[in-house]
Image: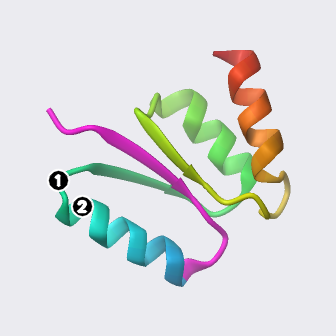
Amino acid sequence: MSKKILVVDDEQSILTLLQYNLIQAGFEVITAIDGEEGLEKGLNESPDLMVLDLMLPKMDGIEVCKQLRQKK
């Protein structure tokens, strides 16, 4: 069973590059393009790891991390 990684970044080129390389390394990859979507997917998808940009639209990465910790 492959590990699930959630990548949250608002720059599509970075998101695509990370997704491609992580899939090539055998991981299941979920992506999100803003903080709110990242929080939602972090709660619903139960990833094993998150790669989280700090400067995101709608909710910054630090707030996403804080809310995930409070709700898990």
**The C terminus lies in quadrant:** top right
Q: Which residue is at a point 79% across and 64% down the rendered structure image?
A: 55
Residue beneath disc 1:
26
Which is nearer the eye, 28 or 49?
49
Q: Residues within 10 Å of mark 2 (few under 14, many from 20)?
A: few
Q: Mark 2 falls on what kind of element?
A: helix
Q: Mark 1 falls on what kind of element?
A: loop
Q: Which residue is at a point 37% across and 66% down the rendered structure image?
A: 19
Q: Which residues are magenta?
A: 1-12
Q: Which residue is at a point 82% across and 64% down the rendered structure image?
A: 57
- Relative placement, left or right, of 9 versus 4 is right
* Residue 40 location (% of width, % of height): 64, 38
**The N terminus lies in quadrant:** top left
Q: Quadrant of residue 24?
A: bottom left
* Residue 56 location (% of width, % of height): 77, 62
Q: Amino acid at mark 1?
A: Gly
Disc marking residue 23: 2
- Residue 59 is one of the magenta-drawn residues: no
Q: Amino acid at mark 2?
A: Ile
Q: Which residue is at a point 41% across and 69% down the rendered structure image?
A: 18
Q: Residues within 10 Å of mark 1 (few under 14, many from 20)?
A: few
